[in-house]
């Protein structure tokens, strides 16, 4: 039986998705189709994890009408939630999809009050002692007191992170997985004072080794859209790096592909899969997500097909 995973997706959004034939800035567009639904990194991750057979417990800040819609929608999928209700409305993310490409317009996040921060930590404490696996997804709302998370006791817990801002305290304590994209990886290298010389054939080995030696990260994964996904770890202080090229597909919508990858790794790890197997599973999940319009419509049978085709596609990085 899958173990429950607490997902901290603290900055959700109400997604408005507009489909147009061709998007040209400055022009009038007639929209072919409009969809609206709950979104954000934590929600996308939780929905996909549930489809894969995982057991997510989703904790997020929800406000006003869109917050209520998100709560009702997630509940309809049979996912347990621990909402923290706030005064300001949940933000709206408007996305224009055209010819397989997406343009996102993201509203500012709500601003939390001191009372709402206190409500958050009291709610989190209700679950923390019985939670063994925790996944932190995305950004924090404005006014969020990050010390509330940094002061938590991580003893006996597996911590997974899909974020880059405000996570230094978590990384210093040690995490099972840090999953970031290429842009975020460069931000991390800059924060650590490491040179970014992409032209060097030793770039990945040198930088990933330095990150893993400085921070207690068990597994480091860097995604880069259509480029290979790379995963790194140190085993008995020796560098191990692998990469896998996602298969070419007809892209329907890429929104939440990284979140789906994260969910795939969470599920694979919860099933006791090995390092390379986790990479294959996560890549298959992200690929299958891009074939459909929304994360909740991911086809599990397509995940299995991609997983089989990718089984022998893992390359070692020396």
Image (spheres, rainbow, N blue to C red):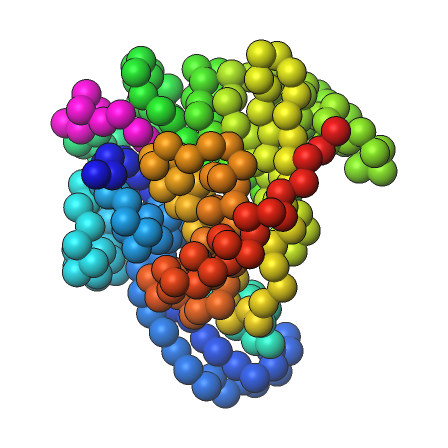
**Left or right of 201, for residue 8:** left
Residue in front for this viewpoint, 73 or 279:
279
Give the percent coordinates (x, y) of residue 46.
31, 48
**Left or right of 241, for residue 70:** left
Q: Residue at x 33, y 62 (%)?
A: 296
Give the percent coordinates (x, y) of residue 102.
55, 66
Quadrant (top left, top right, bottom left, bottom right) of the C terminus: top right
The part of the chain drawn in magenta is 126-135
Give the percent coordinates (x, y) of residue 308.
50, 54
Residue 54 drawn above or below residue 185: below
Q: Residue at x 61, y 59 (%)?
A: 247
Residue in front for this viewpoint, 240 or 111:
240
- Look at the image and tell me whether residue 206 can be seen: yes
Q: Residue at x 45, y 53 (%)?
A: 285
- Look at the image and tell me whether residue 136 can be seen: no
Residue in front for this viewpoint, 24 or 248:
248
Q: Residue at x 17, y 54 (%)?
A: 78
Quadrant (top left, top right, bottom left, bottom right) of the N terminus: top left
């Amino acid at each position: 039986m899958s173990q429950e995973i607490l997902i901290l997706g603290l900055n959700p959004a109400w997604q408005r998705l507009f489909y147009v034939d061709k998007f040209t800035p400055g022009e009038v567009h007639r929209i072919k189709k409009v969809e609206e639904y709950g979104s954000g990194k934590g929600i996308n991750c939780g929905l996909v994890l549930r489809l894969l057979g995982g057991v997510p417990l989703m904790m997020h800040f929800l406000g006003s009408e869109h917050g209520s819609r998100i709560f009702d929608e997630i509940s309809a999928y049979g996912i347990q939630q621990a909402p923290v209700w706030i005064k300001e409305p949940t933000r709206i993310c408007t996305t224009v999809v055209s010819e397989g490409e997406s343009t996102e317009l993201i509203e500012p996040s709500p601003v939390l009050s001191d009372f709402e921060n206190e409500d958050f930590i009291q709610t989190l404490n209700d679950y923390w002692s019985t939670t063994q696996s925790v996944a932190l997804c995305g950004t924090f709302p404005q006014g969020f007191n990050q010390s509330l998370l940094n002061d938590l006791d991580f003893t006996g817990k597996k911590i997974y992170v899909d974020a880059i801002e405000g996570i230094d305290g978590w990384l210093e304590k040690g995490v099972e997985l840090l999953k970031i994209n290429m842009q975020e990886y460069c931000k991390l290298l800059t924060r650590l004072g490491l040179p970014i010389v992409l032209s060097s054939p030793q770039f990945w080995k040198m930088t990933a080794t330095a990150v893993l030696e400085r921070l207690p990260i068990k597994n480091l994964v860097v995604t880069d859209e259509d480029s290979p996904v790379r995963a790194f770890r140190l085993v008995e202080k020796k560098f191990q790096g692998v990469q896998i090229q996602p298969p070419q597909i007809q892209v329907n919508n890429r929104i939440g592909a990284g979140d789906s990858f994260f969910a795939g790794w969470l599920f694979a790890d919860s099933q006791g899969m090995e390092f390379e197997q986790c990479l294959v599973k996560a890549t298959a999940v992200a690929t299958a997500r891009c074939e459909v319009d929304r994360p909740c419509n991911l086809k599990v049978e397509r995940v299995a097909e991609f997983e089989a085709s990718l089984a022998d596609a893992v390359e070692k990085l020396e």
